[in-house]
Image (cartoon, rainbow, N blue to C red):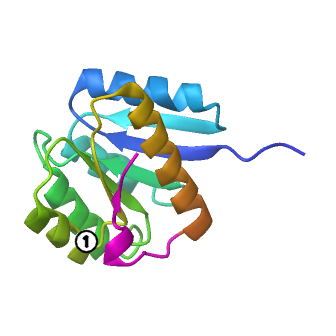
Amino acid sequence: MRETIIQLLLADDDIDDCDLFKEALEELQLSTELNIVHNGEHLMQLLADNAGALPKVLFLDLNMPKKNGFECLAEIKQDDGLKDLPVIIFSTSFDRDIVNLLYDKGAHYYISKPNEFDKLKSVIHKALSAVTKDGHEKNGRENFVLQP
């Protein structure tokens, strides 16, 4: 029996962060396939073009060109074909008010990008475990921020 491949999508304009994410994912040795987009317009076009075969989870940076992560999250959650897609915010900033707003807007989890590679691997693994276990169910506010 073949192992199921987990389809992931990363939307982030920082090439170095994308490379680190990809490397961390490879070291976790999970059965995943990662697609990467570098701006919000490309993300929304990709989701629209593949609405019938959405990824298992979207890791979404907030500060991107052309359309930022806030705008993308709002569009995703307002679209009946996309609203159940688990969205994990993956950002360098951490502001409690913004984190609370993102929870209220429908994001599933929030990750503040760690500055250590082992912590990055740990938090990606934690996020994938949570999403594959819980699926489209959203956890409570107390479990929203994932720590390595």
The foreground one among 104 and 125 is 125
Is residue 127 in view?
yes
Q: Residue at x 15, y 59 (%)?
A: 70
Image label count: 1
**Left or right: 133 in relation to 138:** right
Residue 145 lies in magenta, yes or no? yes
The foreground one among 117 and 11 is 117
**Percent position of residue 28, x then y:** 59, 32
Q: Residue at x 52, y 44 (%)?
A: 125
In the displayed structure, 98 sits above or below 141; it is: above
Say what amino acid the circle numbered 1 marks.
Tyr
**Left or right: 20 in relation to 73:** right
**Percent position of residue 66, x then y:** 10, 42
**Residue picked out by circle 1:** 103
**Left or right: 137 in relation to 47:** right
**Percent position of residue 91, x then y:** 22, 45
In the displayed structure, 68 sits above or below 101; it is: above
* Residue interval drawn in magenta: 136-148
